[in-house]
Structure formats: structure tokens, C-alpha cells
Image: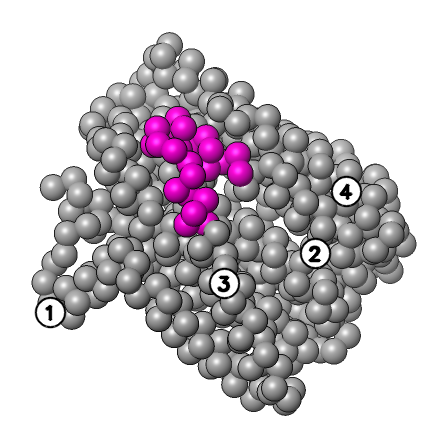
Amino acid sequence: MLQGSRKANALRNLIYAWMSQGFTVIMNMVVRVIFVHVLSKDYVGISGLFSNIITILSVAELGIGSAIVYGLYEPLARGENKKVKALMQFYQRVYISIGCFILIAGIALTPYLSLFIKEMPDIPQLAFIYILFVCNAASSYFFSYKGTLISADQKDYILKRIRIKVLFLMYLVQITILLLTRDYIPYLLVQVLATIAMNFAFSLAADKAYPYLKDKDRVILGKEQFRQIVKNTKALICHKIGTVIVFSTDNLIISKFTGLGNVADYSNYILIQETLNGILTQLFSALAPSVGNMVAVEDARKSLEVFWRIMFLNAWLYGGSALCFFCLGQDFVRTFFGEDYVISTEILLVIIVNFYLTGIRKSVITFKDAYGLFFQNRYTPLIESGINLLVSVWLVQIYGVIGVLLGTTVSSLLAPVWSEPYVLFRYGFRSPVVEYWKQYIKYLLLILGTGSIVWILCGRIRYVPVISFLLKGFCCVIVINSLFFIILRNDKNMKYYLGIIRTIRKGRGGRI
């Protein structure tokens, strides 16, 4: 019964997640194209820079959210409403404090914006624009904690329905503002209002689904619950700081050492990367609550069996996406944003490598978080971030933008790529990690071999706006998936998914 429920919830979450992400991708791309053509390149650069500054401020969250989500899995699975309520009341107090801190600290940074920019752009009301970014980030903490409960209870589809409705209105109004006024400030004001509206709607949905949350009586968090949260948070502080430094300092370093123009060029490719990552991450986000539920009630053998299936999908989806990104990225930017925004193939290659190194870890992270293994490698993210900063600042002065990106590559290879699977297999599955590396290398060789073939084929297609992009896209999808299928056709995980497809075709419910 639990397995069937997990399957249904995961599938429903995934369908709504991809619907939401597909809608967001299309609308976000439309808005971005209009944004780039209506406003100057400096606005594109400022948008990327301020987003990075805000992400760094979000380190104040310290990973408490992840620790509480992990703490919710078991009481939700067991129907222990009192424990859930205690956790949510604690979560509320913490997140309101974090939102206030981000608001105050962010505004306090306003006089020092010039420290992050090599040459200040001629943009009116730049300080006010930055403050709107701060307000948007801070407001997301005041109601979003209730949405986390819905997600942890395997009902993320509820949040996705709300998200689609709010974002549709937001994008519609933003497009109208850009076309009619060419003014960035009202564009940002709409974004702030949409963030507030969305999180307020999440709060109302949680109150409706869990009426006991509205009870005024205060429930004290148990000592054991509090002790576990504190322990996991101590470890997650390191993870949070490390993640923020590794993934949210590139624009700052590029802006400081090479200028806002390069930030604008880089930001368009990061938009593509984040779009792909957003679509693929929905799979793992949809699976995470079900994996958490499974880990809470099943043995390690069953969890390991499911892990191999998810890693198989992880490698196929991220490997294929990385190859498509590499072959299509330049044509996409050239067609939709203009020749002025195209970067070198060498820089694109490093972006792709970082995209894959981060993406292939999704299956490991999903299970590692489900097991609550935050403490065992708590110092790894700090080591990773230290290496990243040192290498990026050193190499940017020699090689420019590509030097910054190589810092991320080097730090990933030296820290999380090997430490995360080691922790998962030793403390979660309690199984030798060598089998993981056999699978990892197998998938990597497959991706490199397939990539060489598809790159040669796409290289023979001459650039013609839109047409060459479509032809290369068709070539990538057909060749990559055909080669993956042919080479992996005898893999047990492939047979498992083919079995599910056959079951669906016959119109019967399968068992996962």
C-alpha cells in the first residue's frame, strides 16, 4: 500500500512539476528575449550580479529548512500531527527571523555596491533596483515554510498548480510593462508582488490541507527533535555556505575583474543551464519525498535497488542534456539574443562540464538527504568553496571568464564528486562504494563517445537562424537517445523501465 501510494504521489508530483517547469521555461524565455532587446546590456549584467548577491545573503538560512524537512518525513509517514505542528511552529519563527535578517543586511549593503562592479553602469536608481531584489528575496521567507510541509507530504503538485497561476499573471504583466514602458523598476515591483502572493497562497493551501496548523495553542518541540535539528543544522551550515560560495560567486568575480558586459554574456548561458537544470531537477524534487518515505519504512537493500534505477535516469537525462547544450547552445544564443552575446566554445565547454558534474550528483544527493546524512561530510563543502574561490580569483586574472569557471570544475572534482557517494554508501546503504564508481565510469564513457559522434554530425550543419538550431536539435535527440538505447539495452535498469512502458501500454497499473 505504501509503495503504491509513493508511486502515485511521485508520478503526480512529477507530472505537475514538468507542466509547471515547461510553462516557466517558455514564459521565462519569452520575457528574457524581450528583456535583452528592450533594455541595455548593463541591465542584463546587473540582473545577474544582484541575483548572486542575494543568493549569498540567503546563506543566513544555514540549512535549517533542509534539516526540518528531513525531520518531517517520519512524523508525516506515521501520522504524528503533534510533532508536525511543533516542527512547523519552530520553522515559522526561524524563517521569519531569517527574512528580517536578509532585509536588514541586504539594505545595509546598498552603499557598497561599487565594490562588486569594475565600472559602475549608467543606470538610474541603481540602489533602488538593488533594494527591490532584496525585498523580493526577504519576502519569500515569511510564508514559504508552510509550502515545505505540503512538499514533504508528497503533495508538491498542489504548490505547482498555484505556481503556474501566479507566474502566468506575473509574466503577462511584466511583458506588457517592458513593451509599453521599457522601465525596469515596475518590472521588478511586479516580481516582488508575485512572490508575496505565491507564498501567501502556499500558506492558505497548507492551512486547508492541515487544519491543525491553525490552532493557536503552542506545541513545544521535543528535546530529541530539537537536538536532531541542531545536529543536522550544524552540518548543513557548512553545506549551505559551501554551496553558496561555489555556485553564487562566479558573477561577482566576473563583474569585479572583467566587467558587467561579460556577466551579461555569461548570464544568457546560465539561463539555459538553469532552465535545463530546472526541468531535470523537477524529477528529483518529485521523487525526494517518496524516497524519504521509503527510507523511513524500508530496509537498505530496497533503497539501494531503487537508487540504481534513479542513477540510471540521472545519467541518461543529464548526460543527454549536457550534449544537447554543447551542440545547440551557440546557435540558440546567436538566434534569440544576438551575436554580441555569444561566448567562445572553450568557455561553453567548461560550463557544460560543470553542469554535468553537478547534475550527475542528483541521485546521490536525493538519497543522502533522505537518510539525513548531513553530518558525515560536513566539512567537504567548506573545502570545496575554499578551493573554488582561490582557483577562480587566481585564474580569472590569467585567463578571464574561463578561469572563474575552471575554479568550479577543480573544486567539484577534488571534493563532492567522490565524498558524497562515499558517505551515502558507507552510512546509508552500508555497501561498498566501488559498484557506484563502475556505474559512474560506464555512463561517463558512454556520454563522451556519444558526444564525439553528435558533435561531428552537428558541425556539418551550417548556421542558418532557427533552421540550423532545429536541425541540430533533431540530430541530437535522435542520435543521443538511439546510441544510449542500443548500448544500454541489456542493462537491468533499462529492462526495468521498458517493463513499465509495456505495462502502461497494456493499460494496467504496474508495481514499482
- Residue 77 appears left or right of 292: left
Indicate which label's residue lies in the foreground, 1 or 2. 1
Residue under numbered circle 4: 391
Mark 3 falls on what kind of element? helix
First in sequence: mark 4 or mark 1? 4
Considering every residue shown, the one lying at the far right of the view is: 119
Q: CA distance from mark 3 to mark 1?
A: 32 Å
Q: Residue at x 11, y 69 (%)?
A: 506
Amino acid type at mark 2:
Ser
Q: Which residues are magenta?
A: 418-440
Considering every residue shown, the one lying at the far top of the view is: 223
- Residue 359 appears left or right of 402: left
- Residue 279 appears left or right of 252: left
Question: Does residue 336 appear in the picture of this structure?
Answer: no
Q: Residue at x 71, y 69 (%)?
A: 345
Residue under numbered circle 2: 47
Q: Quadrant of residue 349?
A: bottom right
Q: In the figure, 206 relative to 466: above or below? A: above
Picture disc at residue 447: 3
Indicate which label's residue lies in the foreground, 4 or 2. 4
Amino acid type at mark 3:
Ile
Mark 2 nearby-residue class (10 Å; few <14, some 14–19, many ≥20) = some
Dot 2 and dot 3 residues touching (CB under 8 Å)? no
First in sequence: mark 4 or mark 2? 2
Mark 2 falls on what kind of element? helix
